[in-house]
Amino acid sequence: MGNPVNRAMAMDNAARAALNSCLATSIEKPAEYGGMIYALKGQILAKPPITQGNPNTVDVGNHAPNCGCPPGSTPVAYYHTHPIASRAGMTGEYNTVSDEDMDVVTDNKLEVGYVGTLDGSLIKFGPSLSKPVVLPGKLKNTKG
């Protein structure tokens, strides 16, 4: 994982796999899901998705020691879903990154964050990027 390009690709792949495992359920419920991504022994791994059942927030575990990641690992990123198009009767922008989303990255000194959205977009964001980037390829946003 010493190569920055390989490391970034491994984080993207871990986020994509984790989000593909939960986005359709997140949309169906609707409830945000998310989790942490960490480095351990040269690998980039994602914790399983968690939810508290809220349609527009999720605690990904970042308040726990080591962001809830295994002992000896280093938290590097986090992922979460944006499963709804409106909040409290107002149309929302599910394909955007909120200040709160960015705060999870900066407050926990993570490299990046990821959001899987209602339309299947995978968005990567973080302080090293000039603006959020929509990664190529759609996520699974429906069951079946």
Image (spheres, rainbow, N blue to C red):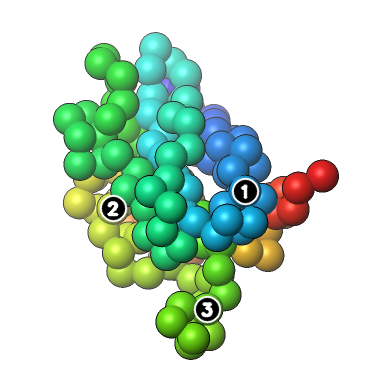
Q: Residue at x 46, y 62 (%)?
A: 55
Tell me the element at label 3: strand
Going by the numbered disc 2, the residue's amino acid type is: Val
- Residue 69 visible here: yes
How far apart marks 1 and 2 lie (CA) works out to 23 Å
- Look at label 1 and name its amino acid: Thr
The residue at the point 65 percent across, 42 percent down is 20
| Left or right placement of residue 87 versus residue 121 in this view | left
- Residue tagged 2: 104
Of badges 1 and 2, nearer the viewer stands 1
**Direction right: furthest residue:** 144
Inspect the image, locate mark 3, and give the three-letter code of the amino acid beneath it. Ser
Q: Secondary structure at mark 1?
A: helix
Q: Quadrant of residue 138?
A: bottom right
Dot 1 corresponds to which residue?
Answer: 25
* Residue under label 3: 86
